[in-house]
Image (spheres, rainbow, N blue to C red):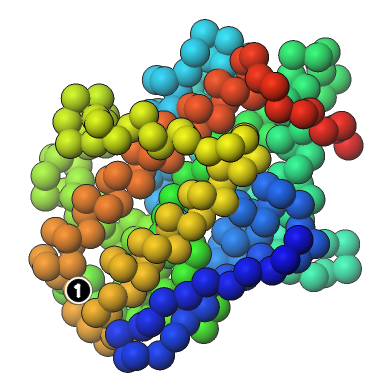
Amino acid sequence: MEERKMGCVLSDGTAGSRFSSTPTASFFAVSLLVILVVIASAPGCQCWSKEGHIMTCRIAQGLLEPAAAHAVRNLLPEYVKGDLSALCVWPDQVRDCHDPHGTPDMCVAGAIHNYTSQLMHYNHGTSDRRYNLTEALLFLSHFMGDIHQPMHVGFTSDEGGNTIDLRWFKHKSNLHHVWDREIILTALADYYGKSMEVFQADIETNFTSGIWSEDVSSWGDCDSLFSCPKKYASESISLACKWGYKGVRHGDILADDYFNSRLPIVTRRIAQGGVRLAMALNRVFGEHNQEIPPPT
C-alpha cells in the first residue's frame, strides 16, 4: 500500500503534514487506528472527551436495527444494562500501544483487524470468543468517535495541536484539548444547562428534521465497510486545516469568535460519528456481502 501524506498551510505560512499511515498496516488500521493512536499516545493528549464519546454512542445505539441492537446488548456486560455509552470511554483507560519489543503505536494496527474480524463472525458461533467480541465492540465504538475529531489527524510537528499552548477564554489549554473537550464543555454550560441529554437531543434534531436532515443520507456513502474510515479521516484532515489550525498561533486567546464558528463543526462531527457507528454495526451484525476475514 502506497504511503500518502496530506497537509495544509498553517497560519504562519508553513506547510504541515498530517500523521502518515504505516505502509504495511492493514486496511482499517491505516485509515482509522494508526492515525488515531499516534496522537492518542502523545504526552498530555486526550481523545474525544467523555461527553463526545457518550453522545456518539448514544446516538448510534438509538439508530440500531433490531439484529444489531440485540447483538450489542448481548455483548455488553450485564452491569451496564444494555447501555453502550457507559463503556465508550473504556478503551482510553486500558489502551497501551506498544508491541512486544516496546515499539509504540503498533498494537492497534493489528488489533483492529482482529476485532473487526471477530465482530463479523458474531453470527457464526462465537460463544468462546465473547470477551474478545466485547472488546472489539468497545474499541470500534470508541475509535469511530475519535476519527471524527479533526485534530486527531493533525500535524506531527505539533502532536495534533497538543504543543500549541493557548488560552481558552481565561484558562490555560492547548489546541488539541480545545477540540477534544473545551468547545463541548463551553456549549454545555452556555446553551444546555450542563445537560448532555439536552445537548444530544439538539444534535439529533439537526440530523432528523433540521439543518443536516438533507445531508444525513450521504453520511453512510462509501464503497465498503473497510473503506469508510478512509473517507472519515480525509474529512477530518480537511476540517483540521480549515477550522482547527486556521488563524491560531501559540499563545493566542481563543474566545467567542472561535467558539461560535467551530461549535457547529464539533456538533456535526459528533452526529456523523454516531450515525456512521450505527451504520457500521448494522452492517456487521446484519446481512452483508463483505468478505469475512478469518479471526485470529
Residue 44 appears in the rendering: no
Q: Residue at x 47, y 35 (%)?
A: 221
**Residue that badge 1 annotates:** 254
Q: Does 57 sit left or right of 199 as displayed?
A: right
Q: Amino acid at mark 1?
A: Leu
Q: Residue at x 79, y 39 (%)?
A: 114
If the image is split into quadrants, where does the N terminus sit? bottom right
Q: Residue at x 24, y 79 (%)?
A: 247
Q: Does 144 sit left or right of 295 as displayed?
A: left
* Nearer-the-camera pick, 66 or 44: 66
User: Does 241 appear above or below 251?
Assistant: above
Residue 176 appears in the rendering: yes
Q: Quadrant of residue 99?
A: bottom right
Q: Residue 265's spot in the image, x, y percent?
A: 27, 53
Q: Residue 159's spot in the image, x, y percent?
A: 51, 76
If the image is split into quadrants, where does the C terminus sit? top right
* Nearer-the-camera pick, 207 or 142: 207
User: Does 10 appear above or below 111?
Assistant: below
Seen as rendered, the residue at the extreme front is 223
Q: Residue 130's spot in the image, x, y percent?
A: 76, 23
User: Does 73 appear above or below 47?
Assistant: above
